[in-house]
Amino acid sequence: MNQAAVQQKASAAAKLQKAQASPKESFWKFLIKNWPLYVMLAPVVLYFIVFKYVPLLGSVIAFKDYNIFEGFWNSPWVGFKWFRILFEQPSFLRIFGNTLIISFYQIIFAFPAPIILALLLNEVRLTAFKRTVQTLVYLPHFLSWALVFGLAYTMLSVQTGLVNNLLQQLGWEPINFLQSTSWFRIVVVGAGVWKEMGWSTIIFLAALTGISPSLYEAAKIDGANRWNQLVHVTLPGMLPSIVILLLLKVGNVLDVGFEQIYVFLNPLTFQVGEVLDTYSFRTGILSGQFSITTAIGLFKSIIGFVLLVSANRLSNKLTGEGLY
């Protein structure tokens, strides 16, 4: 047995050495053998190169005094001038804080909502009812944010809003939800939960279908009730999907959604509602200062990249799951 094992190891080592001796031949043979897969992959790679990586060259204008008539290369270099202007703005800390707070609200309230909905739908045994509910809750995803604001105005307006009419009938004072600094973030995040919760639920329902029924059967044999099955079978089965989506959310922590904020924003709520995206649009795009807009975008990308890498390492250590 020992001699056979030695021969087997020697044969494996010889095959490995042969494969390492001609890596180019192995690669080209593999490429020729699987050429249909590479042909299918080519349009996706081309899309990312043309629309994702080539535009990154435009980030250079964050370090230039960009003039649209002089172009990228002829505009004069100014170094970190636009970053200094951004960080020295009296309102920068307030805007940066608003962005972090709204993003934190989204992670705390909006992120778990589709997970909870998926778990509830997974417990429904009547298929027709389950499909009907799932269809109804993901339809708002296809509505524009302008239409969502119109619906919110219809519900929350002080004069004609359904909610305030109900409050008045109960003997309470009407609440100015849409123009109150106390309610702005709650309304914006709540509208986002209503609009996107059903669509995100599809991902977690797909993760639930990937859990083997044999695990539930084994748990039942061991005497586990529905709650124990949820804790020890369902949630661990969903953990990879939850971790990946959470890491992506952390990586986009400074992207709270331009349209979502912009349609609800008004002069009375600027103090708590203006975020980096709306500030970039107002001071950069509308004023034609494309360099400072690019500087804001580059700043957001760097912060997001650092947070993503850090969160991914922490996740790998704590849960064993991560993006890479």
Image (cartoon, rainbow, N blue to C red):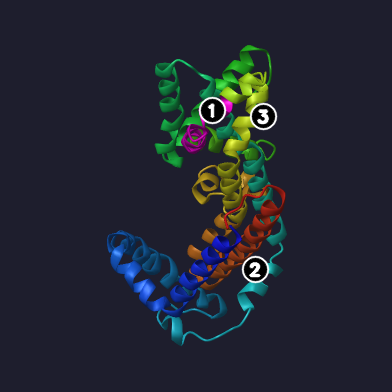
Chain part drawn in magenta: 198-216
Alpha carbon separation for disc pair 1 and 2: 57 Å
In this figure, which residue is indicated by the disc labeled 3? Answer: 231
Residue density around tag 1, few if under 14, some if 14–19, many if 20 or more, within 10 Å: few
Lower sequence index among marks 3 and 2:
2
Left or right? Give the position of 42 relative to 252. left
Total marks placed = 3
Position of 210 relative to 279 (above/below): above
In this figure, which residue is indicated by the disc labeled 2? Answer: 86
Viewer-nearest of labels 3 and 2?
A: 3
What type is the residue that disc 3 sits on? Val
| Residue 289 located within the stretch drawn in magenta | no
Residue sitting at x 66%, y 59%? 307
In this figure, which residue is indicated by the disc labeled 1? Answer: 214
What type is the residue that disc 1 sits on? Ser
Residue sitting at x 51%, y 24%? 121
